[in-house]
Image (cartoon, helix red, strand yellow):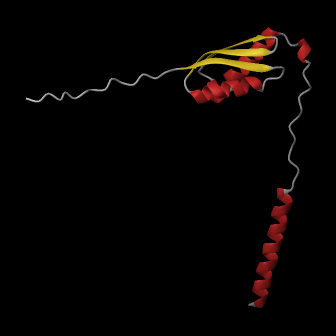
């Protein structure tokens, strides 16, 4: 009985050591992109970069968003479905290299509520 207990204990310790080694294994690092010289990025390129990033965002794919740039200041116009999409568009635009600030002029589409049927309260 004692040998079985010792064998199980040794087995548990060996498995723990094996899992600990795998957990500490080196993770592959993402390659760093070279720094961007913002003095060489014109407004047309900046607006295109922002538009591409917005189009690539899953929650913003089907939204009608236009990006324009003037001196590194990006202006977003168009319509989005929800207020959270409006905030997401701002965050995505700010994340683009060389964007100094973002002016968000996006409008949230208002969903019209279906006409409710009113009950008539006529007393007869």
In this view, the residue in front, 58 or 87, is 87
Q: Quadrant of residue 107?
A: top right
Give coordinates of residue 115: x percent, y percent.
33, 23
**Relative to 9, residue 15 above or below:** above
Q: Quadrant of residue 33?
A: top right
Give coordinates of residue 50: x percent, y percent.
74, 19
**Relative to 10, residue 53 above or below:** above
The quadrant in which the N terminus is found is: bottom right
Give coordinates of residue 104: x percent, y percent.
67, 19
Q: Quadrant of residue 79?
A: top right
Q: Residue furthest bottom?
A: 1
Give coordinates of residue 53: x percent, y percent.
73, 22
Q: Name the residue rendered at 77%, 20% in the picture.
A: 101
Q: Residue furthest left?
A: 124
**Relative to 63, residue 15 above or below:** below
In this view, the residue in front, 14 or 66, is 66
Count of picture labels: 0
**Relative to 11, residue 63 above or below:** above
The quadrant in which the C terminus is found is: top left
Q: As drawn, is 88 to the left or to the right of 121?
A: right
Q: Name the residue rendered at 11%, 30% in the picture.
A: 123
Q: Name the residue rendered at 77%, 17% in the picture.
A: 49
In this view, the residue in front, 39 or 121, is 121
């Amino acid at each position: 009985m004692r040998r079985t207990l010792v064998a199980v204990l040794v087995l548990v310790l060996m498995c723990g050591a094996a899992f600990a080694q795998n957990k500490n294994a080196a993770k592959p690092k993402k390659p760093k992109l070279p720094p961007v010289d913002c003095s060489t990025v014109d407004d047309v390129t900046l607006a295109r970069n922002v538009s591409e990033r917005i189009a690539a965002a899953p929650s913003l794919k089907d939204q009608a968003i236009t990006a324009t740039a003037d001196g590194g200041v990006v202006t977003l116009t168009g319509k989005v479905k929800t207020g959270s999409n409006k905030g997401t568009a701002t965050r995505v635009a700010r994340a683009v290299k060389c964007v100094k600030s973002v002016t968000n002029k996006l409008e949230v589409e208002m969903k019209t509520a279906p006409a409710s049927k009113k009950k008539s309260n006529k007393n007869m």
